[in-house]
Amino acid sequence: METRKPDQTAPDGPARLELEFAVEGRDFAAAGNAASRIKRALEHVGFAARAVRRASITAYEAEMNIVIHARRGVIRACITPEAVTITADDEGPGIPDIELAMQEGYSTAPEDIREMGFGAGMGLPNMRKCSDRFSIESRVGQGTAVRAVIRNERRGTEGRGLDR
């Protein structure tokens, strides 16, 4: 399910586009759909290619974490000319040790997920690497909330390492 609010001008800011996608746990047939639609929206509004790539990776990893680990969740993207903010809120087991979960290669994915080629323990680290700002909050037994901001690079600065 997608909810889309058309371009609107906030009372105190620029035009923005808000997208929202429901994501179901273990729904591998639909996995990646939200990230693909966010990518298309960013391309449509003229985001720089490098920012689109970083946001797409972030959205995909967030979406896959919901599919792999949670019962259900929601992916949101708030797009302005300056940045995209991607949030992922899930109803899942939560993360008991966020610092450990942020280490490359650490995974709690079950064996059947790993056999499908997922759960390598790179999702959260990749999201952090692709984001200009990244935060994660989790409550064991309730779920996890991730927020990532990716700035839209100015035209002509792509590939120059000006994203951090």
Image: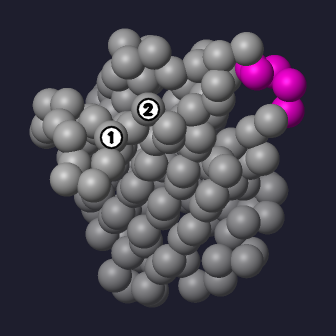
Relative to residue 108, is residue 37 drawn left or right?
Answer: left
The residue to which callout 1 is attached is 14
Q: Is residue 151 above or below residue 149?
A: above
Where does the image place residue 63, in percent across and percent down from the top left? 42, 44
Residue at image coords 40%, 55% = 87
Residue at image coords 73%, 77% = 99
Q: Main secondary structure of the magenta part?
A: loop
Q: Is residue 79 above or below residue 47?
A: below
Q: Which residues are magenta?
A: 157-161
Q: Neighbour class for label 2 at 10 Å: few (<14), some, many (≥20)?
A: some
Q: Is residue 148 above or below residue 49?
A: below
Q: Are marks 2 and 1 in contact (CB under 8 Å)?
A: yes
Q: Mark 2 and mark 1: span between their CA atoms?
A: 8 Å
The residue to which callout 2 is attached is 81
Q: Residue furthest right?
A: 160
Q: Earlier in the sequence, mark 2 or mark 1?
A: 1
Q: Amino acid at mark 1?
A: Pro
- To which quarter of the image does residue 156 belong? top right
Q: Amino acid at mark 2?
A: Pro
Tell which of 12 and 97 is nearer to you: 12
Tell me, yes or no, whether the highlighted magenta stretch contains residue 113: no
Does residue 116 show up? no
